Image (cartoon, helix red, strand yellow):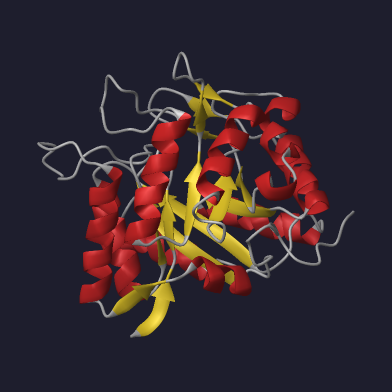
């Protein structure tokens, strides 16, 4: 077997609803159970979004994130947990940073950090420079690792700028996302340019939105990168869109592709070591963070 690949599981996101697909986990118990199934299949990390337990609308509330994290860590105390700090629905720093206030056994290992503003089909994700820098500063102070989300090459360049300002530090983990209407497209040219421009000491995964998910999963596994996969990015099993998928089906397919390429899935323990993180099992986040 060659070097293991990162499998970043994204079960919920902010867009899918029960009206769109009954398979999307919305409640705390549904999310915890989907992650439980995922750990049995084999994942490296999970990227979590929380929803209001009555309306199903995305929420930033740390109490709901706390319930999800607590439920997951009862059976997977080593799993790397990343909490979303998305700017799609919330514009205030106090709201976006609230999940970072969790401590002790509820402390997240990582927080998502989108590296610029961008447009989706119908909405915008607004990430002003002061917001990005403020979130990065809070994460550095708390020893929480940023999950760097880049939708185009300019966002990678902004990560290098954050390094110069000493707001982020290696080793880095990047999610490179392809196929959004206003950003890099899911083709070899865009993919190669973005990977080539990554800083040293960077681990990375490729994500494809909608029909591009399987393509980018397959490409990344073939060239030795990580995979971001889940209903957050794609609700269909097939590109003809005849079958709504479950998260387990998406994960199992990634395992099949990885095996065909003679690759194993990276364990949370191995990822923690490469990212200079605490070992889990009660200790979370980054080791020896240089507090500001």
Residue 62 visible in rendering? yes
Q: Residue 259 at x, y = what percent?
A: 24, 74
Residue lying farthest front? Answer: 74
Q: Residue at x 54, y 49 (%)?
A: 74
In what quadrant of the picture does the N terminus appear? bottom left
Residue 229 visible in rendering? no
Q: Residue 79 at x, y = what percent?
A: 53, 58
In what quadrant of the picture does the C terminus appear? bottom right
Q: Quadrant of residue 5?
A: bottom left
Side of 227 where 87 appears, left or right: right
Side of 223 where 117 appears, left or right: right
Residue lying farthest top? Answer: 55
Q: Residue at x 81, y 67 (%)?
A: 288
Q: Residue 85 at x, y = what percent?
A: 61, 37
Q: Residue at x 30, y 45 (%)?
A: 247
| Closer-to-camera residue (126/29) | 29
Side of 193 where 155 appears, left or right: right
Q: Residue 240 at x, y = what percent?
A: 11, 41
| Closer-to-camera residue (164/29) | 29
Residue lying farthest right? Answer: 292
Work out whether 30 lies above or below 103. Answer: above
Q: Residue at x 29, y 65 (%)?
A: 219
| Closer-to-camera residue (215/261) | 261
């Amino acid at each position: 077997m060659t070097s293991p690949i990162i499998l970043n599981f994204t079960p919920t996101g902010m867009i899918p609803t029960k009206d769109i697909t009954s398979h999307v986990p919305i409640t705390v118990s549904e999310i915890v159970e989907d992650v439980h199934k995922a750990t049995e299949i084999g994942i490296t990390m999970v990227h979590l979004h929380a929803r209001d337990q009555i309306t199903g609308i995305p929420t930033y509330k740390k109490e709901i994130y706390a319930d999800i994290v607590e439920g997951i860590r009862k059976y997977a105390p080593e799993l790397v947990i990343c909490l979303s700090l998305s700017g799609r629905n919330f514009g205030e720093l106090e709201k976006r940073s609230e999940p970072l206030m969790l401590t002790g056994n509820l402390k997240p290992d990582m927080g998502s950090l989108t590296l610029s503003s961008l447009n989706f089909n119908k909405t915008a994700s607004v990430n002003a420079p002061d917001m990005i820098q403020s979130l990065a500063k809070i994460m550095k102070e708390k020893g929480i690792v940023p999950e760097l989300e880049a939708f185009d090459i300019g966002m990678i360049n902004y990560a290098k700028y954050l390094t110069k300002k000493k707001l982020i530090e290696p080793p880095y983990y990047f999610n490179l996302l392809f196929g959004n209407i206003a950003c890099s497209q899911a083709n070899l040219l865009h993919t190669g340019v973005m990977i080539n421009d990554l800083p040293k000491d960077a681990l990375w995964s490729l994500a494809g939105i909608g029909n591009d998910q399987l393509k980018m999963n397959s490409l990344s596994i073939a060239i030795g990168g990580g995979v971001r996969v889940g209903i957050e990015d794609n609700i269909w099993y097939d590109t003809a869109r005849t079958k709504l998928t479950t998260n387990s089906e998406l994960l199992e397919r990634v395992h099949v592709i990885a095996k065909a390429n003679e690759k194993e899935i990276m364990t949370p323990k191995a990822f923690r070591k490469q990212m200079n993180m605490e070992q889990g099992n009660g200790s979370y986040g980054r080791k020896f963070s240089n507090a500001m």
